[in-house]
Each structure stands twice: as structure tokens, then as C-alpha cells.
Image (spheres, rainbow, N blue to C red):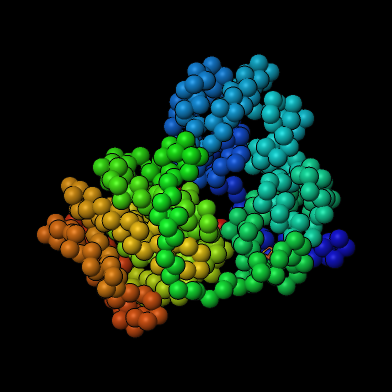
Amino acid sequence: MAAASEALSTILHRLKQTHPNARYELNWENPLQLLVATILAAQATDERVNQVTPKLFARYPDARAFAEADLAELEELVRPTGFYRKKAKAVQDVCKELVARFDGQVPRTMEEMVALPGVARKTANVVLNTAFDVPTGVIVDTHVARVSQRLGLTRQTQSERIERDLMEMVPRDEWVRFGPALVLHGRYLCTANAPRCPECLFNDLCPRIGVTDAAAAPPPPARTRPMPSAAAKKAKPSPASKKAGGGLRALVPPDWQAVLAGELEKPYFQELEAFVSAERQAHQVFPPEEDVFNALRFTPYDRVEVLLLGQDPYHDDGQAHGLCFSVRPGIKPPPSLVNIFKELHTDLGCRIPNHGHLTAWAKRGVLLLNAVLTVRAHEPNSHKNQGWETFTDAVIRALNARKQPLVFLLWGAYAQKKEQLIDTSRHRVIATAHPSPLSAKKFFGSKPFSQANQALAELKQKPIDWQIPNLGDETDD
Ligand code: SF4
């Protein structure tokens, strides 16, 4: 522990450099919304919670509305976050107490917060630290617990004891920022099953407590593409996924479900669901299930201005998150993405960002769609020809059929085969070389970004802002 204390100032400094404005990824506008979102985030991703809360907060604008809600209706609204009966009841019980004791307001002290039904220190710290900027303690969730243990900052396993250790070591004025920064580090780099130690900012000082050599080593070289096993071919979606609402199709965002409805009922899609389900049971598959349809989630059907088509998700640990060419924050941009940024700089003068996370483009109307949406870890193209291409062709057809025209960016021969699905008399196709190092010489100078904006102007649509903000910049992304 003494060595860990000495390393702590370095850890704090590097965390501050990497995540200067670390914050939770839950969306909220007032303390009550943060409290409710935090309750819903138990055993669920922040992204999943963020999908649910806009409708939830519109339906129940204050604690009284939650307290008086029809419980069955509340359950339905929070159902996608899992454990929905328990969570709906927890939210309602807390809100009843807020109405009875605090006139519907969220209290500002730890003592009052933990006296609320079902509210423990972690939830109280999230709300008090984040919504009120009160340093009541260090938030300890599963990520903070794991990373603190691996870094040797604590030997404890219970969250309250871990928090006590961290509160003793970390200066009080750092508490509010330290928790969220460690969460981001744990979520994107020091993950539970595949920590990316070779790329970690602490790898020169981390004792890697509890990390096996195999987990800390670089991923093995790619092997040949596996043949799907007979079991995989026969497998059906798990009872759990059926109960949750129908496997993959339940994860397709509602607006896209509406335009792809017939597609999701076809036999090939059911076989695809069974294949992916069996693959996940037997192997590690990227991206995680909740990220598979991120391209569709971040770019609603009627907001697509540009479709950029990729091929296969990244197959190394922690890279893929459902947007083509994009990697998670904290992950080194792969060579194709580095070349994309170089061309973007040459073409439009955009600053090269300090990360490779392209969500900003997706939210601005660039549908970052791969032709295949899942892959077995470290085995490129391993989910090719299992039905994804048929599904993503249907996405292209749906966009082609849309009244409002759009721009298709097709990089490389594989993507350019899809031109046959596009009515080029209505839409604009910009076909250039692929940014891979193998064809980068031809890609450089192709000016796809300014061409896309020129085409959008001709279609009387607003141009895309292609500048990706740096991590930590204050933006709406
Ligand atoms: S070196 Fe490895 S175990 Fe240590 S914090 Fe970094 S990713 Fe986690």
C-alpha cells in the first residue's frame, strides 16, 4: 500500500490529463433525474438508460408524478433497463419519500440520502457529487472497485471499505472528479475480462493485482475464419433473450424497426439471431450486445444525411462499439482511422482529435454502418455470410427509398458493390479508395469530406461539421 500511495499522485495527474472533465455518461437535467437514472443504471449500461429516460422524464416531470404513477405503466417504461419491476418500485418508493419528507426535492446531505429507501452510498455519492458538486465521498461502482484493486490502491472487496481506503488516499478536492475518471478508465481500458495493459497510461506503475499474464498480454494473432458449428447453426435465441423481447430484433431502435419491420420477421434474421446467440455463448463476440446497433441508434432514419459504409467490426479487445471505423475513447486509433483523420485534415483543415471515437459524426447525421455487425474476438470476418449483409442491404434499400435524398460514401471495392442498391438519379454516391494502409496513397487527396458537403449543398441540405471534438472538450456530443 505504501508503494501505491507514492504512485497515487502520478495516477491522479495522469487521470486528470486524460479525463479533464470526466463525468457520468447518464443524461439528466436536475438532481431528481440523476437519482432516477442512477437507480435504473444498476445492472444496465448508461446508453440503455439514456434511451429510456427522455420518455420517462417527459411522462413524469417531478417526484410527485413518479410517486403517483401507475406502477404497471412505470414498469413498462423502464423495462428495457432490466429488473424493471424492482427498479420501478424502487423509483416510486424513493419518490414517495421525497414527497413526504422533502417536498419532492432531493436532499443535499449524505445522511438524508442514505435514509431514502434503497439508496446506498454509491447512489448518494453520484447524486451529491455530480448534481450538487458536494464531495461527500468517492463513488465506488464495479469499475472503480476493479481498477482500484488492480492498481493496488485497496485490498478491500466491499464497496464501503474500498471507498474508505480511497477517501484516505485521495485528496478531498479530487473526490468528485476521481470517481467518474476511474469509471471511464475501467469501462474503456481496464475492462473486467480483457484489460488493455500494453496501452494503459498506468502500465509502468500498475502491479496488475489479480490480472493474469494472458489477460495483460497483447491479443494473439488472427486465426483463420471459423466455420460455424452445427450447434451454432441449430441454436435458438436463449430463453432469456426471448423473454427480454426477442433477441437482436429487440435491440433495433424503434424508428428503424418501423422501416425494417418486415426484414426482422424473415427466416434469415431468425437464423442470424440464433447464430449470434450461439457465438456469444461459446466465444467472445464484439461489439457487446448493447452496442451492436449503435449506428442505427445514434443516427435515426429520418436524420441520415450521409451513409459511410464499412465492412467488418474491429476484432481486437475493446475497439468495436457499433460504429464503423470508430473505436472507444482511450483506444488507439487503428491505421485506417489514422488515415481518415489525415485526409480530413488535408481536405477540410480539421484538427486531428486526441481519440478515435466517431460518435460526434453519428449524432450529426453520418450513419457509420458496417456491412457485418458482429465478429468473433480476434477472428476477422468470422461472422461474414451469416445474414448480416442481407440485413444491412435492407438498411441501404430503406434509405434509398426515402423521399429525402442523401449522400453515400463508398470507400473501396467492397463498399462500391452496394452502388447497385442506390438510385443514383436521386441520391449522390461518392466512391473513392479505401483508407486502409494498402490503398492509402489513392485515398489521400480524394477529398471525400468536402465532396460530401458539396453534394449535400446541391441536395439543399446542411453540410456536416466533420470536426471531431477532443476528449474533454465541452460539446453537445
Ligand atoms: S495496467 Fe492493466 S490492470 Fe493496470 S490499470 Fe492498466 S489496464 Fe488495468
Q: Nearer the viewer, residue 298 or 98?
A: 298
Residue 251 seen from this side: no
* Residue in the picture at 74% in, 56% down: 148
* Residue in the picture at 49% in, 32% down: 79
Q: Nearer the viewer, residue 338 or 235?
A: 235
Place of residue 250 in the rendered image (x, y in percent of width and height, measured from the top left): 40, 41
Residue 452, quarter of the rendered image? bottom left
Farthest residue to the front: give it: 230
Q: Nearer the viewer, residue 91 or 447?
A: 91
Using residue 154 as the reference point, say whether residue 459 is left or right of it.
left
Residue 64, quarter of the rendered image? top right
Residue 412, quarter of the rendered image? bottom left
On-image quarter of the N terminus: bottom right
Farthest residue to the left: give it: 425
Q: How many marks?
A: 0
Farthest residue to the bottom: give it: 441
Looking at the image, in which quadrant does ligand 1 appear?
Answer: bottom right
Using residue 253 as the reference point, say whether residue 239 is left or right of it.
right
* Residue in the picture at 50% in, 54% down: 280
Using residue 241 as the reference point, say whether residue 466 is left or right of it.
left
Residue 385 seen from this side: yes
Place of residue 363 in the rendered image (x, y in percent of width and height, measured from the top left): 39, 52
* Residue in the picture at 44% in, 67% down: 226
Place of residue 237 in the rendered image (x, y in percent of width and height, measured from the top left): 44, 45
Place of residue 289 in the rendered image (x, y in percent of width and height, measured from the top left): 48, 50
Q: Is residue 435 above or below residue 39?
A: below
